[in-house]
Amino acid sequence: QVQLEESGGRLVQAGGSLRLSCAASGRTLDVAKLAWFRQAPGKEREFIATISWSDGLITNADSLKDRFTISKDNDKNMVYLQMNSLKPEDTAVYYCAGRPHWSGHYDYWGQGTQVTVSS
């Protein structure tokens, strides 16, 4: 099993920046990719970006790639999401997710961290 724990969410003013962290523990060698998703109230979960645990290959959602950047630190088993130029519509619960090597799905999820952007 893999455990994921997000942190860093808070209230921030529009135009500000925030970095979210995701700590991975357990059988981290099982993880092929780690990703960030978000879900705003009343909306479907939205993909933000994913990063390959081994080679760092990144895939971004086109709508967010200019403001959001995913990165990782393998030594610390951490994945980060740098968010810049935040907007009120970025308000959501942000989730870290892990995809095992043998699966085409993100089977591991954190509990989420709340980001609120005030106007």
Image (spheres, grey):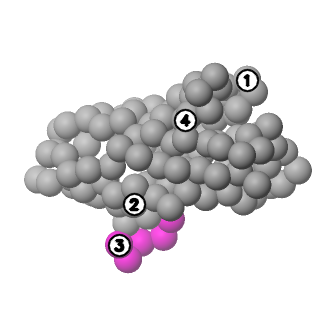
Position of 113 compared to 111: left or right? Answer: left
In the shown orientation, is residue 4 left or right of residue 88?
right
Furthest-left residue in this view: 119
Q: Earlier in the sequence, mark 1 or mark 2?
A: 1
Q: Specify the quadrant that holds the N terminus.
A: bottom right
Measuring 56% from the left and 34% from the top, which residue is drawn there?
78
Label ID, residue 79: 4
Q: Secondary structure at mark 4?
A: strand
Q: Give the crowd class for mark 2: few <14, some 14-19, many >=20 residues within 10 Å.
A: some
Label 3 is placed on what type of residue?
Answer: Pro
Which contiguous range is marked in magenta? 41-45
Label 3 – label 4 distance at C-alpha: 24 Å
Quarter where residue 32 is shown: top right
Asked if the magenta segment contains residue 44, the reply would be yes
Look at the numbered discs 3 and 4 and tell me whether their residues touch, using CB distance below 8 Å: no
Closer to the eye: label 3 or 2: 2
Q: Which mark is residue 93?
A: 2
Q: Earlier in the sequence, mark 3 or mark 2?
A: 3
Q: Which residue is mark 1?
A: 55
> At 20% across and 37% down in the image, what residue appears?
16
State the mark number for residue 41.
Answer: 3
Q: At label 2, which amino acid type do we have?
A: Val
* Element marked by disc 3: loop
Q: Amino acid at mark 1?
A: Asp
Residue 80 belongs to magenta span: no
- Percent of width and height locating residue 113: 40, 55
**Neighbour class for label 4 at 10 Å: few (<14), some, many (≥20)?**
many
Mark 3 and mark 1: Cα distance apart in space? 34 Å
Residue 84 visible at all: yes
Instruction: State which tag comes first along the sequence, 2 or 4.
Output: 4
- Tell me where residue 106 appears, x and y as whole percent: 70, 56
Q: Is residue 100 above or below residue 20?
A: below
